[in-house]
Amino acid sequence: MDDLIINIFGVDSQLSRGFIFGLVHVSIMLLGYYSGFSINRLLKIISNGYVAGIIGAGIAHVLADLIAALLDSTMRPATLGIVFGGLLPLLLVPVLERVVVKSKHHVVIGDHEDVEKDLKSHHHKH
């Protein structure tokens, strides 16, 4: 991975810091999206609730962050902070569920079938 950075950016630059992290994180998300594998789908099946979907999506991002940080030598020292920082907001979900009134227009991005259904339901019929 470090060789890739050297080949693309030269030895070190502000641009190269975190490059592998971003590349790996988004690649993992795309892989999950296009393969149909998702933690939130698994949790939805187990608990049958959209809150599990939200928590699953959060956990999926934390796992992607963990893998990305370990593979990116410029981010590796921050791995633990990134993981704990990513998990902490998930503790707010129960509070947010009680306090925040969700918009009827809000779409929770989950699995590609769900997104497809959401998009179809939002299209105006001509």
Image (cartoon, rainbow, N blue to C red):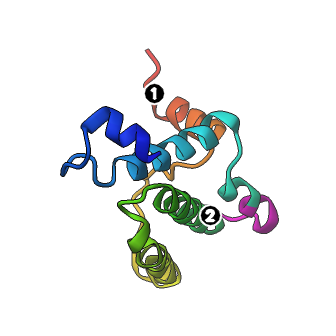
Q: Which residue appears at 27% of the width and 47% of the height? A: 16
State yes or no: discs 1 and 2 in contact (Cβ < 8 Å).
no
Task: Decide: few, some or many residues near mark 1? Use Cα within 10 Å; few <14, some 14-19, many ≥20.
Answer: few
Reply above or below: 14 against 84. Answer: above
**Quadrant of res 74:** bottom left
Which dot, 1 or 2, sits closer to the camera?
A: 2
The residues colored magenta run 43-49
Q: Amino acid at mark 1?
A: His
Which residue is disc 2 drawn over? 56
**Quadrant of res 32:** top right
Image mark count: 2
Which residue is disc 1 drawn over? 123
Give the residue furthest to the left: 14
Q: Amino acid at mark 2?
A: Gly
- Please, what secondary structure does the residue beneath circle 1 have? loop
Q: Which residue appears at 43% of the width and 78% of the height? A: 89
Mark linked to residue 41 = none
* Disc with the residue nearer the chain's start (1 vs 2): 2
- Please, what secondary structure does the residue beneath circle 2 have? helix
Q: Give x and y (percent) for residue 99.
A: 41, 82
